[in-house]
Amino acid sequence: MMKNHYEKLKGCRASKNRDEVLFVMENQNCPLSVEEIYGKVKAKNSSISLSTVYRIIDKLLNLEIIRKAATLEDNTSLYELTKDSHHHYMICTKCKKMIPIDICPIEELEHKISDSTGFNITGHKFELYGECKNCAQKQDRS
């Protein structure tokens, strides 16, 4: 587990299930839904329930160890570990694949707005929706 995440868990009761959820999330390169996290943990720990995973996700959100990375059109939330830097994504509306955007097109605008209004901006989200290359090619072949 990442050191800063360990610090946030000080004072919390030890939990094998929580550690398994964190292990799954640390070993992913894209955000996951609760159901996807549950499926990956369930493959290793057949006794865990979906409601337990939901409770763990709520706890990790409250501790700011994870964050909601995106909400899909069907209102499914996707989660990722909170990192020092933030990420933005392109989300395929067909296969739900999330592709990270390597740059932040909003940071400069955020600074200008903050400077001109005095508003203390604490964060932002930026998501692009469409079809990934594979889904677009499948449609062209149809």
Image (spheres, rainbow, N blue to C red):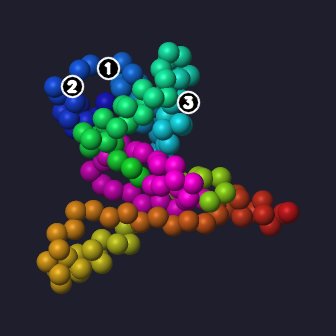
- The CA span between labels 1 and 2 is 9 Å
Which quarter of the image is occupied by the C terminus? bottom right
Residue 35 placement (x, y as % from top left): 53, 36
Q: Amino acid at mark 3?
A: Gly
Residue 63 placement (x, y as % from top left): 24, 39
Could you classify mark 3 by the number of other residues whose Cα lies within 10 Å: few (under 14), some (14-19), or many (20 or more)? some
Q: Earlier in the sequence, mark 1 or mark 3?
A: 1
Q: Which residue is at the far bottom?
A: 116
Query: Is 141 rendered above or below residue 63?
Result: below
Residue ID for mark 2: 12
**Relative horizontal placement of residue 53, taking residue 139 as reference (left or right):** left
Residue at screen point 32% across, 20% down = 15
Could you classify mark 1 by the number of other residues whose Cα lies within 10 Å: few (under 14), some (14-19), or many (20 or more)? few
Confirm whether residue 102 shows in the render.
no
Q: Are marks 1 and 2 in contact (CB under 8 Å)?
A: yes
Q: Amino acid at mark 2?
A: Cys
- The CA span between labels 3 and 2 is 25 Å
Q: Amino acid at mark 1?
A: Ser
Query: Is 65 rendered above or below residue 122?
Result: above
Q: Earlier in the sequence, mark 3 or mark 2?
A: 2
Residue 77: assigned label: none
Q: Is residue 115 magenta?
A: no
Residue ID for mark 1: 15
The magenta stretch is 70-92
Q: Which residue is at the far right?
A: 142
Determine whether the residue tagged by mark 1 lies in a helix, strand or loop.
Answer: loop
- The CA span between labels 1 and 3 is 18 Å
**Relative horizontal placement of residue 94, taking residue 99 as reference (left or right):** right
Q: Is residue 85 magenta?
A: yes
Determine whether the residue tagged by mark 3 lies in a helix, strand or loop.
Answer: helix
Residue ID for mark 3: 39
